[in-house]
Image (cartoon, rainbow, N blue to C red):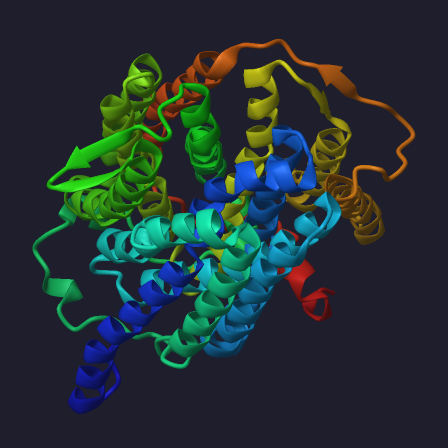
């Protein structure tokens, strides 16, 4: 399988670590778009005179655009290479923050952060896909290191951004850091490339470590359509949605929660460093969130993905419980918020690694892109969590449209032609799939511009369950995911092609309609 001469092989062997470094650097540059968001929530509320739940819709818009378009972006990367796409992503991400700094309305803020989400999604999907392709021998570690750039990338910038917000205003912080981070992504993109077809590390076949993982790796490359026809994919999707929900709530709500418990400005001293509790917590959270990803990835390379997931998800549930119980104590707030992030971030190393194990390397960027949309699904619950915590009214119209449209698109594109194996005519598929996509677009537009007309109303005042109630839901989700990993996923076989099944209407076919017949 190895066809390059020895010198060429050595060049790529050395290069893949350089490529990994610049992939991680690009991830670091877009980390603040998600993990620095919580710093901007209070000043945005004040400046725009908006409810917290309305401001937090921005975060949902960002995550939806950052995740749900990754499959399409992954298809583009697999076809055209990573360099150009990541450069475009850097431009979009930088302009998104610049626009957020100039926004004078919620609609303008939503649109600007949507552009940032589009750019961040390109960078994220490309970097993770690159790790899966270049490192079949250290897939968990490489995906973990790459994801660590996104998880911990904002650790060193939390303090200067927070200070700039306090001294020069949040608008100045948005604009200046948007330009800096966008430029870093563009520079990093110049060093990215994809491995040659059929390339494998020289020592992979003889490596003694990771035998448990090797036994759980497929020898075939699944297209996204064939992947979606497997029960393994949907089990992974459910697990990632469950775990991401709790983590995204903590990411978006940490600042408001600290304020509500009156611990945000209490000075904390650790290792001769004194900072307000919230800033200390944010810095510690980013470090632990990044550190956990290669750690859990490395562990999974040795003991297996499913067992590692079981342990990590259970620890995450324990961490959230301790955070809520001891949140009024400033020091324990810092400790257990960091513990929460250490238990949550592992999905971003374990999920791409097991996706590569189960479904192969050739379409790894696009395949993980579909799995990564679970994060977007989970993000829908973040503003609902804010409304539940405070007992506020919440408009569910966009959620109804997103749910209905997603269900129609899923049924017509995946469930009907693959799992149910219906005699599905192209015209019927196109009509239902088109309606589904239109409803999803309608829901996204309604999220960005809440004044858009709809033929129904769905605004309800939610019961006030407080932070304890919201995070109790997250605990149940984490424990459920741990049980699924141990009792279900661990017992499932590695996916194989079903030779007698009709060819599915693959997701990539929709992305490249000229290939459909």
Determine whether, in the image, residue 251 is placed left or right of residue 153: right
Among the 4 quarters of the image, the one containing residue 407: top right
Quadrant the C terminus occupies: bottom right
Determine whether, in the image, residue 303 is placed left or right of residue 479: left
At a point 35% along the width and 40% down the height, the residue shown is 347
Picture coordinates of residue 476, whole percent (x, y): 41, 16
Quadrant the N terminus occupies: bottom left
- Residue 239 seen in the current view: no
At a point 26% along the width and 61% down the height, the residue shown is 136
Asked whether 52 or 128 is in front, the reply is 52
Number of residue marks: 0
Placement of 4 over or under 278, stated as above or below: below
Picture coordinates of residue 134, whole percent (x, y): 30, 68
Placement of 497 over or under 17, stated as above or below: above
Picture coordinates of residue 35, whole percent (x, y): 42, 46
- Residue 149 seen in the current view: yes
Taking the view exactly as shown, the residue that stands out farthest to the front is 167
At a point 50% along the width and 41% down the height, the residue shown is 375
At a point 29% along the width and 50% down the height, the residue shown is 217
Among the 4 quarters of the image, the one containing residue 157: bottom left
């Amino acid at each position: 399988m190895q066809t390059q001469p020895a010198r060429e092989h050595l060049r790529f062997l050395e290069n893949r670590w350089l490529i990994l470094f610049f992939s991680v650097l690009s991830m670091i540059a877009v980390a603040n778009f998600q993990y620095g968001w919580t710093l901007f929530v209070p000043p945005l509320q004040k400046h725009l005179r908006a409810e917290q739940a309305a401001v937090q819709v921005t975060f949902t818009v960002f995550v939806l655009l950052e995740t749900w378009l990754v499959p399409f972006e992954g298809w583009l990367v697999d076809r055209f290479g990573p360099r150009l796409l990541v450069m475009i992503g850097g431009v979009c991400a930088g302009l998104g923050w610049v626009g957020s700094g100039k926004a004078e309305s919620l609609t303008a803020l939503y649109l600007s952060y949507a552009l940032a989400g589009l750019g961040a999604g390109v960078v994220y999907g490309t970097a993770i896909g690159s790790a899966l392709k270049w490192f079949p021998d250290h897939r968990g570690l490489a995906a973990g290191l790459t994801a660590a750039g996104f998880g911990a990338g904002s650790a060193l910038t939390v303090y200067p951004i927070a200070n700039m917000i306090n001294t020069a205003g949040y608008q100045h912080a948005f604009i200046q850091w948007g330009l800096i981070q966008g430029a870093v992504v563009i520079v990093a993109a110049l060093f990215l490339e994809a491995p040659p077809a059929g390339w494998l590390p020289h020592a992979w076949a003889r490596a003694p470590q990771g035998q448990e993982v090797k036994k759980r790796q497929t020898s075939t490359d699944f297209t996204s359509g064939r992947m979606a026809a497997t029960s393994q994919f949907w089990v992974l999707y459910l697990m990632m949605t469950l775990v991401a929900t709790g983590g995204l709530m903590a990411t978006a709500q940490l600042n408001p929660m600290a304020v509500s418990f009156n611990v945000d400005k209490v000075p904390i001293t650790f290792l001769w460093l004194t900072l307000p509790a919230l800033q200390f917590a944010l810095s510690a959270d980013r470090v632990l969130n990044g550190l956990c990803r290669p750690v859990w990835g490395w562990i999974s390379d040795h003991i297996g993905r499913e067992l590692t997931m079981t342990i990590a998800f259970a620890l995450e549930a324990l961490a959230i419980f301790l955070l809520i119980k001891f949140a009024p104590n400033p020091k324990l707030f810092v400790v257990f918020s960091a513990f929460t992030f250490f238990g949550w971030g592992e999905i971003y190393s374990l999920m791409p690694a097991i996706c590569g194990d189960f479904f192969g390397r050739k379409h790894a960027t696009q395949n993980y892109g579909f799995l990564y949309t679970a994060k977007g699904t989970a993000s829908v619950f973040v503003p609902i969590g804010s409304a539940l915590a405070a007992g506020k009214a919440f408009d569910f119209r966009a959620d109804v449209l997103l749910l209905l449209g997603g269900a129609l698109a899923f049924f017509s594109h995946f469930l009907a032609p693959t799992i149910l194996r219906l005699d599905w005519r192209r015209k019927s598929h196109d009509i239902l799939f088109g309606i589904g996509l239109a409803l999803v677009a309608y829901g996204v537009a309604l999220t960005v511009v809440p004044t858009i007309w709809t033929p129904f109303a769905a605004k309800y005042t939610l019961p006030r369950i407080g932070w304890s109630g919201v995070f109790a839901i997250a605990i149940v989700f984490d424990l459920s995911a741990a049980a699924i990993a141990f009792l279900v996923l661990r017992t499932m076989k590695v996916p194989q092609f079903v030779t007698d099944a009709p060819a599915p209407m693959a997701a990539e076919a929709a992305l490249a309609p000229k290939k459909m017949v």
